[in-house]
Image (cartoon, rainbow, N blue to C red):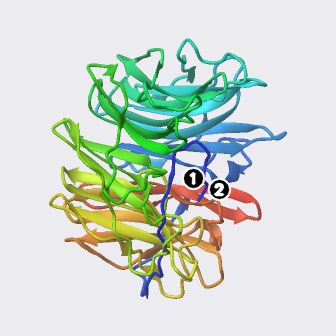
């Protein structure tokens, strides 16, 4: 699983030995077709998946092209059939694009974000949208007026759309030597200038902002999360809320009582399920020095105190928990959520974890069950995505290391609050591994409890291709 700098993923200390169990029925993957001339998925990175309804989804990522060039690909699924990918159309003067994530609004149209080079010293944030099912040319997002015009390293990190032409984006940019956060809205199909995230007063000269994700419950009503460095050099988690398309100042997260004064706190994922009802997950360091996962809930528009998540017994006391920052937290109603990640055991092994919130109470984390013969989750493994459809009914996508020390992909489903047997994903064409940088990146589940999966696999040495599957 590819870790991309700037996606505001959160490290947290947790890793514990998983139980190997008999696997459920394997899931067969089919290859995705890249644009003509594409030489494979760039570094295995195919991170984007969003669905307007079952059988109608979009996916995307970055591909290798001839002469050491690269392109961004948009893949469209129509009535259950994936079409050949189309290159992202770039604005004049842009090159070396990436596509990072996608979101579909209630009207069925989708939008995406990525980056491109506009000069040797400028990386720009890109936005692209569908109109009547057709993708337009990507646009360069206009940064705040004080943003650097040279040496710029702008990058969007999250997008959420609630209706056609109505989306919100969060990202980072440079102003001189400072890394700052930005927020932007698409309104009636037009993207406005991004605005700076206004941090609490006690921030560092260079606050080194990480801006993770954004989630909206209505047009112009959203929450974004991330972290920044204070004037004391401590990393703190923040939330920022908008009403009527106006962003308010960021707020510090009230950490669990076990948090150290040097908390190294961050939020990596957020999802909203109703007006003023959201859940965010991240990590913090305890007074004993353990980097621990946490969850914090907004109810009726107000954030409560974050709750520490108890790791499985056997977790390392000073390990590193990792939340991948894709779609790792899912809620079906306020107080009914699930998320997962990766943690370190006392014996130094990486394992995955799953944790549920039931009736507003977070349960202790469970070690991700792996198929028989699996060794551990691995540094690039554990739980990547979680998607829930009803209370106690969820599916998680994960990666693990098999007995041949090769990375593999799997799903696991929860029914009536109990997680079942893992289901390995069989790759196309007899491929034997998803590779270190491959695996499941996208997961979307539907009312009939089937799930759409997308990702990448190692078709041959140093050559990744895309796959899709239905679990």
Q: Which mark is residue 32?
A: 1
Q: Position of residue 465 (x, y in %)?
A: 65, 56
Above or below residue 29? Residue 443 is: above
Using the image as rendered, state which of residue 352 and residue 373 is in the foreground.
352
Q: Position of residue 396 (x, y in %)?
A: 39, 64
Q: Residue sitting at 41 percent across and 74 percent down?
A: 368
Residue 77 visible in image:
no
Task: Specify few, some or many for label 2: CA neighbours under 10 Å numbering under 14, 14-19, or 20 or more.
Answer: many
Question: Secondary structure beneath disc 1?
Answer: loop
Using the image as rendered, state which of residue 339 and residue 111 is in the foreground.
339
Q: Which mark is residue 320?
A: none
Which label sits in the foreground, 1 or 2? 2
Query: Is tag 1's residue or tag 2's residue first in the polypeptide sequence?
Result: 1
Q: Is residue 412 left or right of residue 122?
A: left
- Residue that sits furthest to the right in the current view: 67
Q: Residue sitting at 36 percent across and 45 percent down?
A: 270
Q: Is residue 447 left or right of residue 346?
A: left
Residue contact at pointers 1 and 2, CB within 8 angstroms: yes
Q: Is residue 142 left or right of residue 72?
A: left
Q: Residue sitting at 42 percent across and 47 percent down?
A: 267
Q: Which mark is residue 465?
A: 2
Question: Secondary structure beneath disc 2?
Answer: strand
- Residue that sits furthest to the top in the current view: 145
Using the image as rendered, state which of residue 185 and residue 311 is in the foreground.
311
Q: Position of residue 99 (x, y in %)?
A: 58, 38
Q: Position of residue 199 (x, y in %)?
A: 43, 28
Task: Specify few, some or many for label 1: CA neighbours under 10 Å numbering under 14, 14-19, or 20 or more.
Answer: many
Quadrant location of the C terminus in the rendered image: bottom left
Q: How many numbered marks have been drawn onto this rendered protein structure?
A: 2
């Amino acid at each position: 699983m590819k870790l991309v700098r700037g996606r505001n993923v959160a490290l947290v200390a947790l890793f514990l030995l998983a139980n190997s169990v008999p696997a459920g029925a394997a899931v067969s993957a089919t290859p995705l077709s890249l644009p003509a001339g594409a030489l494979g998925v760039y570094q295995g990175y195919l991170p984007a998946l969003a669905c307007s309804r079952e059988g109608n989804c979009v996916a995307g990522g970055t591909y290798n092209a001839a002469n050491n060039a690269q392109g961004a690909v948009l893949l469209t699924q129509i009535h259950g059939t994936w079409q050949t990918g189309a290159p992202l159309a770039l604005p004049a003067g842009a090159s070396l694009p990436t596509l990072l994530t996608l979101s579909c609004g209630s009207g069925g149209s989708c939008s995406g974000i990525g980056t491109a080079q506009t000069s040797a010293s400028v990386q720009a944030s890109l936005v692209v949208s569908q109109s009547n099912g057709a993708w337009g040319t990507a646009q360069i997002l206009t940064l705040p007026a004080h943003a650097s015009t040279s040496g710029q390293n702008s990058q969007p990190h999250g997008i959420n759309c609630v209706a056609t032409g109505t989306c919100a984006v969060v990202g980072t940019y440079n102003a001189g030597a400072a890394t700052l956060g930005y927020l932007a809205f698409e309104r009636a199909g037009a993207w406005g200038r991004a605005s700076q995230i206004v941090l609490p007063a006690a921030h560092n000269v260079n606050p080194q902002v990480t801006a993770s994700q954004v989630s909206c419950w209505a047009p112009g009503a959203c929450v974004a999360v991330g972290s920044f460095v204070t004037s004391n050099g401590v990393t703190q988690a923040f939330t920022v809320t908008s009403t009527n398309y106006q962003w308010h100042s960021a707020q510090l997260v009230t950490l669990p009582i076990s948090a150290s004064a040097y908390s190294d706190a961050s939020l990596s994922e957020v999802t909203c399920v109703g007006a003023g009802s959201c859940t965010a997950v991240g990590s913090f360091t305890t007074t004993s020095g353990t980097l621990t996962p946490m969850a914090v809930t907004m109810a009726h528009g107000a954030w409560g105190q974050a709750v520490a998540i108890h790791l499985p017994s056997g977790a390392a006391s000073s390990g590193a928990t990792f939340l991948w920052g894709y779609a790792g937290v899912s809620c079906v109603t306020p107080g009914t959520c699930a998320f997962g990640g990766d943690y370190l055991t006392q014996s130094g092994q990486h394992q995955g974890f799953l944790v549920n919130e039931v009736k507003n109470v977070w349960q202790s984390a469970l070690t991700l069950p792996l198929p028989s013969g699996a060794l551990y989750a691995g540094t690039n493994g554990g739980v990547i995505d979680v998607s829930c459809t009803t209370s106690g009914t969820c599916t998680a996508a994960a990666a693990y290391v098999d007995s041949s020390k090769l990375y593999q992909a799997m799903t696991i489903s929860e029914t009536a609050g109990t997680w079942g047997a893992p289901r390995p994903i069989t790759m196309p064409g007899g491929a034997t591994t998803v590779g270190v940088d491959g695996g499941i990146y996208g997961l979307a589940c539907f009312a009939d409890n089937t799930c759409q999966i997308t990702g990448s696999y190692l078709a041959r040495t140093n050559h990744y291709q895309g796959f899709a599957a239905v679990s």
